[in-house]
Image: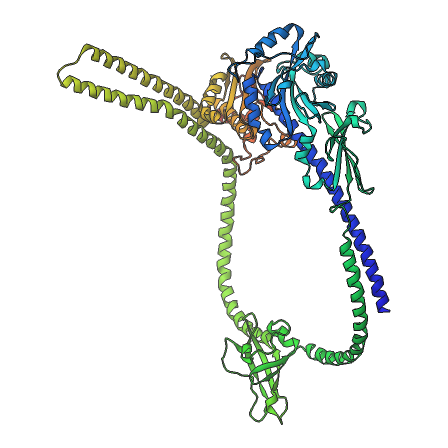
């Protein structure tokens, strides 16, 4: 019976192993295909992101010459980081009437080659309203055939160009044979339109009118897939890539040799291949507004086949084990009945001992022979740890003598002992010892040990409680006095907290003023350094002149040269100290306004220029450009210190948050008088902008996205309180991620007088 059950179990295990291997093969095939599709999509997106960066380059500058295009592509280092493309190109749109001028300009272009390009021609030659000519080609080596190619004469390319022009999106061509590729393998080109930076492109007509050309990446699909596909997979996996057409046309073209882009078996359409019926998969990718179909077929081989050797070993081992188990089962059954009776008897005796709440131990010749679980738990030992230990281990640290010895005539022993637990703690116990066999004392003694630590602790606690009660009466009087002092301290703390709350905004203003001091110190360093250097040089010239005079003769030419040098040195010192004086004047005005904050009549442009002067060093280090458009005639009767504090906080906020991750930024400040007695101040930046959640919490105190990185969360809260409270104006903020931030502040030309000033008056 056992043998039959074992054989059935072996068969079941073999079937189970085969099923597990099939699932593993399916899972491995699915992972391989999804990874290839995912890696292909990621690699495509990387190249397309490079096109976007080149499009951004053309958006910044109106016209990028050949040398700038060459340098920028080299900086991308795509051929090192992401090989697999054929060339990066710029295709220029050239009307028919400008064709001759374009050809002459390219031939005379010596920005990269001293001899220019005298052999540059447009091919194929044709007459049409406009031409799309490949003007920049990186690298030029091995791509010379594409230089000057007129894509307008090629219908496949022309349709992709027109789609890109009309939609403004990145467009890929259908399967093409590249003119610069002699192998005849399929390829495609991805192009992104370039429009004039200042032209509107909201409609199709506007995009057609603003089109300058295209930036493009040329691919040979076999090179691209070679970088994506792990070559170790190819013996077991066949990959075919088909171009199913533009998405706007449905993208449903049936796979055929005409739209086959890539065949992992070798040259496209080179021959048939053997596939496993259960290992087939089709995945799709959207590539430049076209749908690609990736078809995968698993080959019979090492990667996608069952391991029949493992199954055979399992079957043989299962048969042998089944035979051995059947023999062992019969033998074990005979011993099981005998052992069961013995186990029950021993278990009952052991349970009787272990259930006792006291410890029981047999000690012979100073060694613990056996003990129950109660003693081990009492002394904190794991099960079986005390058996075989010397009896002195129970009293270690208290005495070195063996106290577990009965009387010479077998008398009982009774007393209290301090035993030592396994963790070193002391434990008071009541011990009772009796010889196991009076006729044979060498068999040892049985000791019964009970824990009396609670009783000992109670006795000690009673003594300590009596002493503690006396101490408590003395401490009660002292605590009563402390309560009264604590009440007074809490009242003082409450007053201090209110003062700290009022001082928090003032501290933030002083911190801002400290930053201004650092900026002014940096700006003053240059003019004062120049003055010191020039003064030192002038002193050396005077000393040299005195030495020549003392030698007995000064020629008129030497005197004229000395006077000219002295005049130049004095002019340098005067100009440098004048610059330092202007900076100090600006800083003094800002510092006086922000510390005193007196109401007076002032020009808004002057306060703005003084504030920007104190931030010149920080703005220059941040590579931040500031444009100001404020009329000199716009005057306010208000609080210039508060206005300067608002501008300082806005500048600090922009440098800390707006331009994170950007090499440079731009701040635009404008002001105009609008309406009756009102002025509108606009502060704009072209930074990263804010999300709706951040915009909703912008005025909350202590809210910041830069906690621990220089942000206190008080900047915009202070701005809001000053604008609405001190200046009696209002503030509005508009922002969106990636679109910068615009802050509009509306202020009265004549601010109401503050209550504290009225009281002082």
Q: Which residue is outermost to the left? A: 552
Looking at the picture, tell me which residue is in the foreground, 601 or 196.
196
Q: Quadrant of residue 747?
A: top right
In this rendering, is residue 409 above or below 302? below
Q: Quadrant of residue 731?
A: top right
Residue 583 on image: x %, y %: 40, 21
Residue at 27% in and 15% down: 565
* Left or right relative to 603: residue 456: right
Residue at 69% in and 79% down: 353
> What's the coloring here?
rainbow
* Left or right relative to 621: residue 348: right
Looking at the picture, tell me which residue is in the foreground, 242 or 145.
145
Residue 677 shows in the view: no
Looking at the picture, tell me which residue is in the foreground, 699 or 265.
265
Residue 102 on image: x %, y %: 61, 9
Q: Number of numbered discs present?
A: 0
Residue 708 shows in the view: yes
Q: Quadrant of residue 65?
A: top right
* Left or right relative to 446: residue 294: right
Residue at 48% in and 63% down: 474
Residue 526 on image: x %, y %: 37, 24
Residue 598 on image: x %, y %: 46, 23
């Amino acid at each position: 019976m056992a043998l039959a059950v074992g054989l059935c179990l072996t068969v079941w295990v073999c079937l189970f192993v085969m099923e597990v291997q099939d699932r593993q093969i399916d899972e491995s095939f699915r992972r391989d295909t999804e990874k290839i599709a995912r890696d292909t999509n990621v690699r495509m997106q990387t190249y397309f992101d490079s096109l976007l960066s080149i499009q951004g380059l053309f958006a910044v500058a109106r016209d990028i010459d050949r040398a700038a295009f060459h340098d920028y592509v080299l900086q991308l280092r795509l051929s090192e980081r992401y090989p697999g493309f054929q060339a990066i190109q710029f295709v220029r749109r050239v009307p028919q009437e400008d064709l001759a001028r374009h050809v002459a300009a390219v031939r005379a272009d010596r920005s990269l080659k001293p001899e220019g390009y005298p052999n540059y021609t447009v091919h194929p030659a044709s007459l049409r309203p406009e031409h799309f000519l490949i003007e920049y080609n990186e690298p030029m080596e091995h791509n010379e055939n594409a230089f000057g190619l007129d894509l307008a004469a090629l219908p496949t390319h022309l349709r992709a160009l027109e789609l890109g022009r009309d939609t403004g999106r990145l467009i890929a061509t259908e399967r093409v044979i590249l003119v610069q590729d002699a192998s005849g393998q399929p390829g495609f080109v991805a192009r992104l339109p370039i429009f004039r930076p200042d032209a509107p492109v909201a409609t199709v007509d506007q995009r057609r009118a603003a089109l300058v050309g295209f930036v493009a990446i040329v691919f040979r699909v076999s090179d691209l897939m070679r970088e994506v596909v792990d070559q170790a997979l190819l013996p077991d996996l066949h990959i075919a890539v088909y171009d199913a057409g533009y998405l706007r046309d449905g993208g449903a073209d049936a796979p055929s040799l005409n739209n086959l882009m890539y065949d992992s078996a070798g040259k496209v359409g080179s021959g048939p291949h053997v596939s496993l019926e259960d290992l087939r998969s089709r995945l799709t990718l959207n590539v430049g507004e076209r749908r690609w179909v990736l078809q995968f077929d698993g080959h019979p081989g090492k990667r996608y086949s069952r391991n029949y050797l493992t199954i055979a070993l399992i079957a043989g081992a299962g048969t042998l084990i089944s035979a051995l188990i059947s023999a062992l089962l019969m033998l074990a059954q005979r011993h099981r009945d005998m052992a069961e009776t013995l186990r029950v008897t021993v278990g009952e005796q052991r349970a009787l001992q272990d259930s006792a709440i006291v410890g029981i131990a047999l000690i012979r010749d100073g060694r613990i022979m056996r003990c129950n679980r109660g003693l081990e738990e009492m002394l904190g030992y794991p099960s079986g740890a005390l058996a075989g230990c010397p009896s002195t281990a129970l009293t270690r640290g208290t005495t070195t003598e063996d106290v577990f010895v009965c009387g010479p005539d077998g008398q009982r022993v009774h007393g209290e002992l301090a035993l030592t637990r396994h963790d070193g703690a002391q434990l008071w116990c009541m011990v009772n010892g009796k010889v196991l066999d009076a006729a044979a004392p060498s068999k040892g003694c049985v000791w019964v040990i009970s824990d009396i630590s609670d009783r000992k602790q109670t006795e000690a606690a009673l003594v300590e409680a009596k002493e503690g009660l006396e101490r408590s009466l003395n401490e009660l009087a002292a605590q009563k006095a402390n309560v009264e002092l604590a009440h007074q301290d809490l009242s003082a703390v409450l007053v201090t907290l209110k003062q700290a709350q009022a001082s928090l905004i003032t501290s933030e203003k002083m911190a801002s003023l400290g930053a201004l001091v650092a900026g002014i110190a940096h700006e003053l360093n240059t003019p004062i350094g120049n003055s010191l250097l020039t003064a030192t040089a002038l002193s050396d010239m005077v000393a040299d002149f005195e030495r020549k005079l003392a030698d007995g003769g000064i020629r008129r030419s030497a005197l004229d040269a000395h006077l000219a040098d002295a005049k130049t040195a004095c002019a340098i010192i005067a100009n440098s100290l004048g610059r330092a004086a202007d900076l100090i004047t600006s800083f003094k005005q800002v510092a006086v306004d922000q510390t005193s904050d007196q109401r007076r009549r002032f020009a808004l442009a002057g306060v703005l220029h003084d504030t920007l002067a104190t931030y010149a060093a920080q703005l220059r280090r941040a590579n931040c450009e500031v444009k100001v458009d404020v009329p000199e005639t716009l005057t306010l009767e208000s609080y210039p210190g508060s206005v300067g504090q608002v501008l300082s906080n806005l500048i600090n906020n922009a440098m800390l948050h707006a331009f994170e991750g950007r090499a440079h930024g731009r701040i635009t400040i404008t002001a105009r008088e609008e309406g009756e007695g009102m002025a509108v101040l606009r502060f704009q930046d072209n930074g990263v902008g804010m999300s709706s959640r951040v915009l909703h919490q912008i005025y909350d105190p202590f809210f910041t996205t830069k906690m621990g990185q220089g942000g206190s969360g008080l900047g915009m809260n202070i701005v809001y309180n000053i604008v609405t409270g001190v200046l009696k104006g209002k503030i509005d903020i508009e922002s969106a991620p990636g679109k910068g931030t615009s802050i509009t502040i509306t202020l009265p030309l004549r601010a109401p007088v503050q209550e504290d000033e009225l009281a002082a008056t």
